[in-house]
Image (cartoon, rainbow, N blue to C red):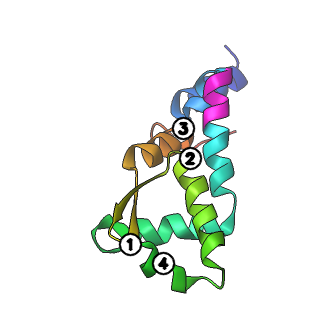
Amino acid sequence: MSNQDLALTDVTERCSPLVREPLSEGRAHEIARTFKALGDPVRLRLLSLIASHDGGEACVCDISPSFDLSQPTISHHLKVLREAGLLDSERRGTWVYYRVIPAALHQLSSALADADPTAAVTA
């Protein structure tokens, strides 16, 4: 086995599932939809604001002032994040509270994370 073959084997063993084996068509669509939802800076900030809010959930009334956007625009972005499976929501009276779905974030991070984050990848 050549040094290049050894290096490729070593990298493949330590890299994310995206490198270890090809994604199925369905899984690729699922992951792409989630990353597409996060591809907008407003939605990424919304997710971050909700995840970092006290108790891990936030009311629309808590996060709306952080943006120079209309309420319908914020609602649209929240809907996209919900449809992508990143947020869950619950109506309490007149307000809707949002929380991040931890399993969804874990799936995204595990799709990209190294098996051993302390190992140095050499090409």
Q: Residues within 10 Å of mark 2 (few under 14, many from 20)?
A: some
Residue 50: x %, y % from top left: 43, 68
Q: CA distance from mark 2 to mark 1?
A: 21 Å
Residue 94 marker:
1
Residue found 59% across the figure and 42% down from its top: 121
How many numbered marks, from 0 up?
4
Q: Residues within 10 Å of mark 3 (few under 14, many from 20)?
A: some
Dot 2 or dot 3: first in sequence order is 2
Image quadrant where residue 93 sits = bottom left
From the image, tell me which residue sits under label 4. Answer: 63
Name the amino acid, label 4. Answer: Ile
Name the amino acid, label 1. Answer: Thr
Q: Are marks 1 and 4 in contact (CB under 8 Å)?
A: no
Q: Is residue 118 visible?
A: no
Mark 2 or mark 3, whichever is nearer to me: 2
Magenta residue span: 25-30
Name the amino acid, label 3. Answer: Ala
Q: Are marks 2 and 3 in contact (CB under 8 Å)?
A: no
**Magenta residues, dominant SS class:** helix
**Depth check, front residue: 15 or 3:** 15
Residue 67 is covered by the magenta coloring: no
Q: Secondary structure at mark 3?
A: helix
Dot 1 or dot 3: first in sequence order is 1
Q: CA distance from mark 2 to mark 3?
A: 20 Å
Extreme left residue here? 55
The quadrant of the picture occupied by the C terminus is top right
Mark 1 or mark 4, whichever is nearer to me: 1
From the image, tell me which residue sits under label 3. Answer: 111
Name the amino acid, label 2. Answer: Glu
Dot 4 or dot 2: first in sequence order is 4
Mark 2 or mark 1, whichever is nearer to me: 1
From the image, tell me which residue sits under label 2. Answer: 83
